[in-house]
Amino acid sequence: MLPPRIAGRLTALSMFCALALAGVPALAQVQPPAAPPAKQKTQVPGYYRMMLGQFEVTALYDGYVDLDTKVLKFTSPGEVQSLLARMFVASTPGMQTAVNAYLVNTGANLILVDTGTAACFGPTLGRVVENLRAAGYNPAQVDTVLLTHMHGDHVCGLMADGKAVFANANVYVDKAEAGYWLDEASAARAPRDAQSSFAMARAAVAPYQAAGRLRTFGAGDQLVAGVSAVPARGHTPGHSAYLFKSGNQSLLVWGDIVHSHAVQFRRPEVALEFDSDSTQAVRTRKKIFADAARGKLWVAGAHLPFPGIGHVRVESKGYAWVPVEYGPVRTDR
């Protein structure tokens, strides 16, 4: 038997608990937890920003296309599958291949390199302008457009509803490139399945031609302060890269030097079915890889995994792609 003093305390405690619990609903009345929220199933806006010396560089994601592995030449299906598996790249329904453009604010100019696909190639593409706006700019602020070449996934974004999207911009393209794609005789000689590519190129630049804003350049021509054209022929007759320099930093925006990062860095000899001159494209790729690795250049590619910015490193076999690390926009470097 408990001492009276302790028994009294327990009785008082029992009464207190009973009174406290009197205001609590029965456990059977407690509501089950709410269902988890619906999945959002959307990605963040497609832009990435970094500084290059005093230049601000913004990568813009246009979207993606699934490329059939059969477009890769000078290799075998077995080698392609091995190289894709090595980099954990799926080949079904195709190699997911990004389409990127690059916006560079030099302080004096707002320069867009390539313009994406607009409505030319389906629902997984066409988001350059949307992402340019998300990045804090609008098309009317772009004063210079540099085209690496005139395939539809690089030029279709120039025009919408027959009007210039970048109405205040001068558009620059290599003289040989323009001469090929805008020449009616070239179009007439091309295979029937290539006719649409000529039509896309002509339609995209038409508003700029009409306004006197389409400019062609040759080797050694000055384009914009801090920017020089680098010949990169092979993929198309006048394919060009652009070298941006600010302070002691350089960025080579190289267009279509690479379509499959998993295959072509390891094996630069692998070409594309739709290269206009595959042999020349291979020579160009090898030279640009060597120059980029030796100079430790930043590079940016239209079909590298977004944001498509990074470095090229020499390997015992071929090269390796070293992508940029996500981080804050650093102005102290």
Image (tube, rainbow, N blue to C red):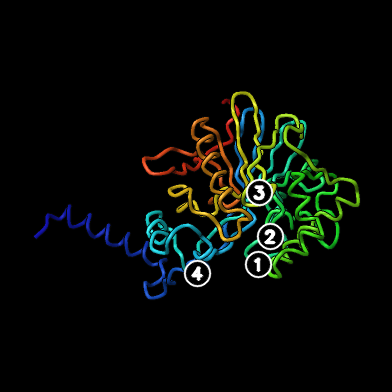
Q: Do the residues labelled 3 and 2 touch (CB within 8 Å)?
A: no
Q: Name the residue under label 3.
A: 101
Q: Is residue 286 left or right of residue 266?
A: right
Q: Quadrant of the N terminus?
A: bottom left
- Residue 162, above or below 320: below
Kind of element beneath mark 4: loop
Kind of residue sitting beneath label 3 = Ala
**The furthest residue to the top:** 247
Q: Distance between the residues labelled 1 and 3?
A: 17 Å
Density class for disc 1 (Cα within 10 Å; few <14, some 14-19, many ≥20) is few
**Image spot of residue 169 (x, y percent):** 82, 44
Q: How far apart are marks 3 and 2 (CA)?
A: 11 Å
Density class for disc 4 (Cα within 10 Å; few <14, some 14-19, many ≥20) is few
**Which quarter of the figure has residue 31?**
bottom left
**Image spot of residue 125 (x, y percent):** 65, 61
Q: How far apart are marks 2 and 4 (CA)?
A: 20 Å
Q: Earlier in the sequence, mark 3 or mark 2?
A: 3
The label on residue 123 is: 1
Q: Distance between the residues labelled 4 and 1?
A: 16 Å
Kind of residue sitting beneath label 2 = Gly
Q: Mark 2 points at which residue?
A: 126
User: In the image, what residue occupies the spot 49% across and 64% down?
Assistant: 69
Kind of residue sitting beneath label 1 = Pro
Kind of element beneath mark 3: strand
User: In the image, what residue occupies the spot 36% across and 72% down?
Assistant: 27
The label on residue 93 is: 4
**Which quarter of the figure has residue 98?**
bottom right
Q: How far apart are marks 4 and 3 (CA)?
A: 24 Å
